[in-house]
Amino acid sequence: MLQGKSIIVGITGSVAAYKTLDLVKRLRNEGASVSVIMTASAQRFITPLSMQIASQGTIYNDMFEHPLSHVSLPAAADLFIISPASANIIGKYANAIADDMLSTTLLAYSGTVILAPAMNWRMYENPILRKQLDYLISLGIKTVGPEKGSLACGEEGIGRMADTGAIMESVYTVMTPQDLNSERVLITAGPTREHLDPVRFISNRSSGKMGYALARNAKVRGADVTLISGPVSLDAPYGVEMVRVETASEMHEAVLEKASTSSILVMCAAVSDFAPEKVETHKIEKTESMTLNLRKNPDILSAVAKLQKKPFTVGFSAESGNRIDRARQKMESKHADMIVFNDILKKDAGFDSDANEVTILDRKGEKTLPRMSKDDVAAEIFDRVVELKKI
Ligand code: PMT
């Protein structure tokens, strides 16, 4: 996502400085070129050599060693991140103080700035600091964190620097057009579990990766996102409201509760079509053979279609083979506005893979995409939703 982007990372004196090694590596892995500026205090916590290895570039820490870099670096940068941002740099920035390489370069920069504050809770809650931070925010400076938790000094409180994942999400957000910022997006992901007894259930191979990628993409494009997730082992996307469910009936109830107040619904979950007629309260004893009686689960998409106030609805269609006809039929029968067809027999795509190969179908046409990451598929799906909602 950051291919060709130039990012300045400023590091100030805080015990959280070591976390910035990982941030710099992640920015580079996404294709960005990273220039690092360290204050004198930052170098007491982490060595310039470690940062040089992580960034594969020059470390700027002295104005006079790199004359005019405080002008040339910001002129070429697409983004400036201060991680960690101490009370000192926040105070200097808000008061236009430029007395070292970092504060001077920051003052010479006119693009997007993200601050990741980190400090003791007493400093963070001090009204003087808060006033300075609020002033910077009023000028359009972005912040991420800090979080509550145990602090380096041994105290509990607000002041822990946001983790790398959260900082990366705010980087994606500021680098992405906010074309979903007026939307409330409801997404389902993962499998459902239909219990037979206290230890056994019927489920499927859905990992949740596709649905979670959709939630991340909608979030970085500015949407208010709720993710209704079946049981998966993925971390919750940053800034997304999570609703965890297990069975198809629970997912049905959760979707119906939120659908009328959502503007877009994406049903990516692999909802079990059937559930055992009876859930035994004791473990079923082993016999030579057994017959299971199943009942049909409610169809969630069809139920949403019957709502008086229904969102723009996107379904998925998991088919064995090139059955685009079945996908289109599902779009019609379930009254969806769009359906995403995936052939689950394709190698390294669909269930539990990091990639997918899909055709996006709607009432105006269809678009077949090559195999790509689930993050890229998610971006294509929302690109089309945005296009269709404009028509
Ligand atoms: O989770 P991953 O490992 O990343 O895998 C992604 C995926 C393969 C699960 C995903 O891309 C996908 O195809 N999801 C839909 C799977 C599915 O249940 O397809 P279906 O053809 O059986 O259902 C059609 C649509 O009806 C789906 O949008 C489904 O969510 C919905 N449905 C199904 C049953 C039901 N009772 N209610 C529903 O609303």
Image: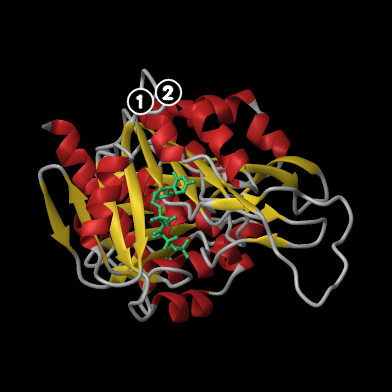
- Residue 389 percent across, percent down from the top left: 19, 33
Examine the rendered structure and indicate whether residue 125 appears above or below residue 143: above
Residue type, label 2: Ser
Residue type, label 1: Lys
**What crowding class fits label 1: few (fewer than 14 Cα within 10 Å), some (14-19), or many (20 or more)?**
some
Camera-nearest residue between 43 and 150: 150
- Confirm whether residue 297 shows in the render: yes
**Mark 1 → mark 2, Cα distance in angstroms:** 6 Å
Q: Which residue is mark 2?
A: 260
Examine the rendered structure and indicate whether residue 167 appears above or below residue 59: above
- Residue 22 percent across, percent down from the top left: 52, 69
Left or right of 366? Residue 28 is right
To which quarter of the image does residue 290 belong? bottom right
* Tally of numbered tags: 2
Left or right of 8? Residue 207 is right
Image quarter hosting the N terminus? bottom left
Query: Cβ–Cβ below 8 Å for labels 1 and 2?
Result: yes
To which quarter of the image does residue 6 belong? bottom left
Q: Residue at the location (29% across, 72% down)?
A: 321
First in residue order: circle 1 vs circle 2: 2
To which quarter of the image does residue 43 belong? bottom right
Q: Which residue is mark 1?
A: 310
Camera-nearest residue between 201 and 224: 201
Image quarter hosting the C terminus? top left
- Residue 53 percent across, percent down from the top left: 46, 81
Give SS at disc 1. Answer: loop
Camera-nearest residue between 172 and 265: 265
Q: Residue at the location (53% across, 64% down)?
A: 207
- Confirm whether residue 132 shows in the render: no
